[in-house]
Amino acid sequence: MPQSLLPNIMTFISQIDPFDKIDKAELRELCAHVKISYLGKGEKVDLDEDDKEKSLYIVRTGSMEQRKTDGVLRARLGPEDLFGFTFLNSDVNDNEGYYATAIENTLLYLIPHSALQTLFKHSPHVAEHFASQAQVRLKSALDVVWSNKEKGLFLRRVGDIATGRIAIVTADMSIRKVAH
């Protein structure tokens, strides 16, 4: 990867969970290993090619669709979404697999498994954020200590923000009057 792309890649990746929890120097080292891939609409990512190193994928632009091997929709992904966690685990069995297809022109960042393993050796505390099992990643995200300011409205009690005053409006009222 050309070094001129590194600052742009770092800026993008540093804003995505769980990469936002990595020390800046370690993130720079990790980003130096990022590979860039472009997929046209309808192209598939070959997730289980044996001669290729496994990678964690980050959608930079575009969108992807994951389907289980039986064709059932698994997920739709857009910018800043990650996939490939399950393929980083050597114990994945074939019936847990899936394939990913670009549903529009898509730019992907690929982080090789070996680069992630190096990161885990230097920073074992971030390893659980990259676990192959979704429930382990979710638990690690919930264990993060947030300040009250960071929690915002979505982690406050309803009684703390609710009001007893209920606005009753009719369909013929103007937006200004409803807002007032």
Image: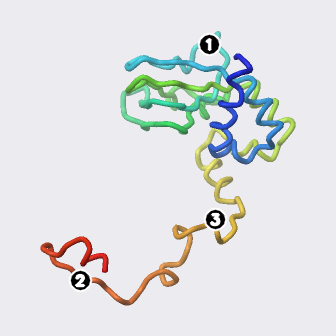
Q: Is residue 126 above or below residue 92?
A: below
At x 52%, y 83%, the residue is 160
Looking at the image, which is closer to me, 79 or 96? Answer: 79
At x 73%, y 23%, the residue is 33
In the picture, measured across the screen, residue 78 lies left or right of residue 85, that is left
Question: What's the CA distance linking mark 1 and mark 2?
Answer: 63 Å
Q: Earlier in the sequence, mark 3 or mark 1?
A: 1
Label 1 environment density (alpha carbons within 10 Å; few <14, some 14–19, many ≥20): few
User: Tags 3 and 1 in contact by the CB under 8 Å rule?
Assistant: no
At x 36%, y 28%, the residue is 71
Task: Determine which quarter of the picture holds residue 171.
Answer: bottom left
Report the residue marked by disc 3: 150
Q: Give the quadrant of the N terminus.
A: top right
Circle on res. 168: 2
> What amino acid does circle 2 point to?
Ile
Dot 1: what SS?
loop
Dot 2: what SS?
loop
Percent x, y for residue 146?
69, 64
Report the residue marked by disc 1: 50
Looking at the image, which is closer to me, 134 or 159? Answer: 159
User: Tags 3 and 2 in contact by the CB under 8 Å rule?
Assistant: no
In the picture, measured across the screen, residue 123 lies left or right of residue 100, that is right
Q: Is residue 44 above or below residue 12?
A: above
Question: What's the CA distance linking mark 3 and mark 2?
Answer: 32 Å
Percent x, y for residue 114?
76, 24
At x 83%, y 43%, the residue is 124
Q: Give the quadrant of the C terminus.
A: bottom left
> What amino acid does circle 1 point to?
Asp
Residue placed farthest to the right in the image? 122
| Disc number lying in front (1 or 2) | 2
Percent x, y for residue 40?
42, 17
> What amino acid does circle 3 point to?
Glu
